[in-house]
């Protein structure tokens, strides 16, 4: 699964670079291109997670922030590793604050000290990583 995600992230990176000035249809094109939302069970999980609107917008600078809780350190570790791999492939980095049972992720575009479409896409991919890690945990 990690190899598939890495391939998707590489595709996302090139697609984002090509479409930074694109309209709001960017989300749809990205997800169609990398195939993240083509699994019904993932769609349902993402919709449920999105209803809770866990990403917040905070100021100074304006950025997205989200706290993830984990049942054990092994799951947390898998999540952090996958997010770091994703960030490296995308070359767009958030800040990770790692605690024993939680990870806080913050992201914004540093060049303009504000949130851009790339940051919103980043947050969606991090959500996908979180769901994937939770799914892997249930199979251990």
Image (tube, rainbow, N blue to C red):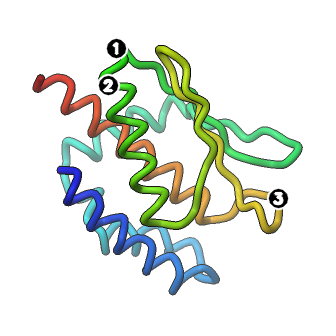
Which image quadrant is residue 97 in? top right
Q: How many marks?
A: 3
Q: Nearer the viewer, residue 124 or 6?
A: 6
* Tag 3 residue: 113
Which mark, by number, is residue 64? none
Rendered residue at 47%/38% (across/down): 50
Circles 2 and 1 in contact, beta carbons < 8 Å? yes
Q: CA distance from mark 3 to mark 2?
A: 31 Å
Q: Which mark is residue 75?
A: 2
Left or right position of 67 against 1? right
Q: Are marks 3 and 2 in contact (CB under 8 Å)?
A: no
Quickly name the residue at label 1. Answer: 72
Q: From what the image shows, is residue 114 above or below residue 126?
A: below
Q: Position of residue 59 (x, y in %)?
A: 85, 42
Residue 17 versus residue 125 in the image, above or below = below
Question: Is 119 positioned to the left or the right of 108 in the image?
Answer: left
């Amino acid at each position: 699964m990690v190899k598939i995600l890495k391939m998707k992230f590489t595709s996302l990176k090139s697609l984002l670079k090509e479409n930074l000035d694109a309209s709001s249809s960017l989300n749809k094109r990205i997800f169609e291109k990398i195939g993240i939302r083509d699994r019904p069970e993932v769609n349902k999980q993402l919709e449920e997670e999105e209803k809770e609107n866990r990403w917040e917008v905070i100021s100074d600078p304006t950025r997205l922030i989200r706290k993830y809780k984990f049942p054990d350190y092994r799951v947390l570790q898998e999540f952090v590793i996958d997010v770091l791999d994703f960030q490296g492939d995308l070359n767009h980095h958030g800040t990770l604050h790692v605690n024993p049972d939680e990870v806080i992720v913050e992201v914004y575009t540093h060049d303009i000290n504000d949130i851009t479409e790339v940051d919103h896409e980043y947050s969606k991919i991090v959500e996908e990583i979180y769901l994937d890690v939770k799914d892997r945990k249930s199979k251990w």
